[in-house]
C-alpha cells in the first residue's frame, strides 16, 4: 500500500518546520509579480510562514517578504495579509 509523504516547509519567521498545508505562502513569479498562493500551486519562488497573528505582524513590521522574495512587495499584499 502506498503512503503519502508529508511535505515539511520552514517558516521564515520562527524557523520551525510544519506540514505545507499548515502554512501560508507568498510567491514571486518569473515576471516579477507577487501574489498570495492559497492553493500552493503557483510556480515561482515562495516564502512560507505560520498563520498566527504574531508572525504576520512581524512580517508586516519588518517587511520580511522583501528580503526573502528579493523584490519590493507591494503594500496591497501586506494589507491583504493583515486582513486575514
Image (cartoon, rainbow, N blue to C red):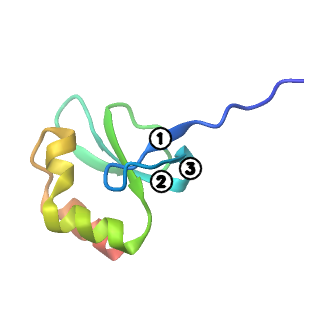
Q: Earlier in the sequence, mark 2 or mark 1?
A: 1
Relative to 31, is 36 above or below? below
Relative to 75, is 17 above or below? above
Rate crowding at label 1 as few (under 14), some (14 to 19) or many (20 or more) other CA atoms within 10 Å. some
Rate crowding at label 2 as few (under 14), some (14 to 19) or many (20 or more) other CA atoms within 10 Å. many
Cβ–Cβ under 8 Å for marks 3 and 2: yes
Image coordinates for residue 12, horizontal then vertical, percent: 32, 49
Quarter assignment of residue 44: top left
Looking at the rendering, in which quadrant would you find the N terminus? top right
Q: Name the element at disc 3.
A: helix
Foreground: disc 2 or disc 1: 1
The residue singled out by tag 3 in the image is: 21
Foreground residue among 83 and 1: 1
Image coordinates for residue 59, horizontal then vertical, percent: 24, 61
The dot on residue 36 is none
Rate crowding at label 3 as few (under 14), some (14 to 19) or many (20 or more) other CA atoms within 10 Å. some
Q: Earlier in the sequence, mark 3 or mark 1?
A: 1
Cβ–Cβ under 8 Å for marks 2 and 1: yes
Q: Residue at x 38, y 54 (%)?
A: 49
Q: CA distance from mark 3 to mark 2?
A: 6 Å
Residue 37 seen in render:
no
Image coordinates for residue 73, horizontal then vertical, percent: 15, 51
Image coordinates for residue 81, horizontal then vertical, percent: 31, 66
Q: Name the element at disc 1.
A: strand
The residue singled out by tag 2 in the image is: 23
The residue singled out by tag 1 in the image is: 9
Q: Is residue 22 left or right of residue 54?
A: right
Quarter assignment of residue 74: bottom left
Q: Is residue 2 left or right of residue 7?
A: right
Q: CA distance from mark 2 to mark 1?
A: 8 Å
Q: Residue at x 53, y 44 (%)?
A: 20
Amino acid at each position: 500500500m502506498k503512503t503519502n509523504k508529508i511535505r515539511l516547509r520552514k517558516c521564515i519567521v520562527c524557523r520551525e518546520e510544519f506540514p505545507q498545508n499548515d502554512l501560508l505562502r507568498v510567491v514571486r513569479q518569473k515576471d516579477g509579480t507577487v501574489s498570495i498562493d492559497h492553493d500552493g500551486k503557483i510556480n515561482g519562488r515562495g516564502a512560507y510562514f505560520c498563520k498566527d497573528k504574531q508572525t504576520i505582524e512581524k512580517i508586516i513590521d519588518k517587511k520580511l517578504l522583501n528580503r526573502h522574495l528579493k523584490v519590493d512587495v507591494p503594500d496591497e499584499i501586506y494589507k491583504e495579509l493583515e486582513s486575514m
